[in-house]
Image (spheres, rainbow, N blue to C red):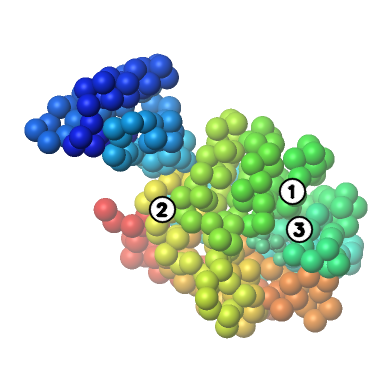
């Protein structure tokens, strides 16, 4: 980073800043311009917090040179990371589709969903056993019983399973059953949960918080990476805007923006981003066209009687159509040799 001193900064203030830089075992490179002094902070590559210097006397401004999310950044790791979900690898334009109900409700409901997801040609089964609901009066999930049903569905279909973790203490239990640990929008900045997921060996599907900027999102991913777990998949699931016609607003921009900023795979969840089953396929197609490495789609055999997110859940037949459409778009991109990462 560059520390820009005020035009009025005294020599003593400059020296004080340099001493503070050195106290963190960083090097300070002084550039004494005609008007201003600029101090370049050079370290061993670890990110430096600008707040350590911003209030020092004589400091005008601080310009970061590299991104605050080092491990997640493309600067640090230029190739696309390939992250496993069962035997599949997500990243670099893979088109991996995760389908399944919002919540595991019963054996019949889950096994029927699992079979439909498998028959449609999707790659993994989702279903929440622990549900982070906005209302405490809404269905909270079946807990460990739900995890057992997910394991049974995997046994039956061979599909890897994706399920949500909502507290750090539950990570070891959920990791015993699941192939992928989902961290939901409401928990994107639950730092103890991010750290616990970072200590796990399981792939993590990290959803964007509904009010999170892309920088916040990547800093959350950085928490997981910094604890040693490299297998992180990002998932755009819509953000809150002034618009009320849909549950959230699908931030399609986020897909190519993230592709520029990070090597991590990025998926789109058009179920939560729209909140309306009639809109899900259109956004799924646009997500693939924009370069998403995959999709997360809610599927329910009987959406009218679903215990959560019925309004946005697809019936099996519609889901099979969506998978075909997503594949058709992916084939067009492939035939035209269009990369998932924007041209730079
Ligand atoms: C979910 O996947 O069912 C879910 C709760 O999603 P989000 O965290 O994106 O709201
Ligand atoms: Mn849901």
Compared across the picture, whether 300 is left or right of 207 comes to right
Disc 3 C-beta below 8 A from ligand 1: yes
In percent of width and height, residue 38 lies at 22, 31
Q: Helix, strand, or loop for circle 2?
A: helix
Q: Nearer the viewer, mark 3 or mark 2?
A: 3
Asked if residue 201 shows in the view, the reply is no
Residue 210 image offset from top left, x and y in percent? 59, 62
Q: Give the mark, 1 or 3, whose residue is nearer the N terminus.
A: 3
Residue at (43%, 46%) from the top-left corner? 262
Left or right: 234 in relation to 197: left
| x, y percent for residue 143 | 87, 52
Q: Is residue 22 above or below residue 118?
A: above
Q: Quarter of the picture for ligand 2?
A: bottom right
Mark 2 sits on what residue? Answer: 259
Q: Tell me: residue 292, above or below residue 270.
A: above
The residues bearing labels 1 and 3 have C-alpha atoms spaced at a distance of 9 Å
Quote the CA–CA distance across marks 3 and 2.
28 Å
Q: Is residue 181 visible?
A: yes
Residue 45 appears left or right of 183: left
Nearer to the camera, 202 or 120: 202
Nearer the observer, 108 or 235: 235
User: What residue did someone put label 3 on?
Assistant: 132
- Residue 165's label in the rendered image is 1
């Amino acid at each position: 980073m560059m520390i820009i001193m005020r035009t009025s900064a005294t020599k003593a203030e400059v020296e004080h800043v340099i001493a503070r830089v050195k106290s963190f075992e960083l090097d300070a490179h002084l550039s004494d311009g005609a008007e201003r002094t600029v101090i370049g902070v050079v370290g061993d590559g670890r990110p430096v917090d600008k707040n350590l210097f911003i209030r020092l006397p004589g400091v005008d401004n601080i310009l970061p040179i590299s991104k605050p999310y080092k491990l997640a950044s493309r600067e640090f790791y230029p190739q696309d990371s390939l992250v496993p979900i069962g035997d599949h690898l997500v990243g670099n334009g893979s088109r991996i589709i995760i389908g399944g109900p919002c919540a595991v409700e019963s054996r019949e409901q889950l096994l029927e969903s699992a079979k439909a997801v498998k028959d449609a040609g999707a790659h993994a089964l989702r279903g929440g056993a622990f549900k982070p609901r906005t209302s405490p009066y809404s269905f909270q999930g079946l807990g460990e019983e739900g995890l057992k049903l997910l394991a049974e569905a995997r046994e039956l279909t061979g599909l890897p399973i994706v399920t949500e973790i909502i507290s750090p203490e539950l990570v070891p239990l959920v990791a015993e059953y699941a192939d992928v640990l989902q961290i939901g929008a409401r928990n994107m900045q639950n730092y103890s949960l991010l750290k616990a997921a970072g200590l796990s060996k399981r792939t993590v599907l990290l959803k964007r918080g509904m009010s999170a900027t892309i920088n916040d999102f990547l800093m959350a991913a950085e928490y997981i990476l910094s604890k040693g777990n490299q297998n992180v998949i990002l998932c755009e699931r819509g953000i809150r805007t002034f618009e009320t016609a849909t549950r959230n607003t699908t931030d399609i921009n986020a897909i190519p923006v993230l592709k520029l900023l990070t090597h991590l795979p990025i998926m789109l969840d058009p179920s939560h981003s729209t909140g309306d089953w009639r809109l899900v396929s259109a956004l799924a197609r646009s997500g693939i066209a924009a370069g998403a490495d995959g999709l997360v789609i809610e599927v329910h055999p009987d959406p009218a009687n679903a215990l959560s997110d019925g309004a946005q859940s697809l019936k099996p037949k519609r889901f099979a159509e969506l998978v075909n459409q997503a594949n058709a778009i992916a084939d067009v991109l492939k035939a035209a040799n269009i990369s998932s990462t924007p041209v730079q």
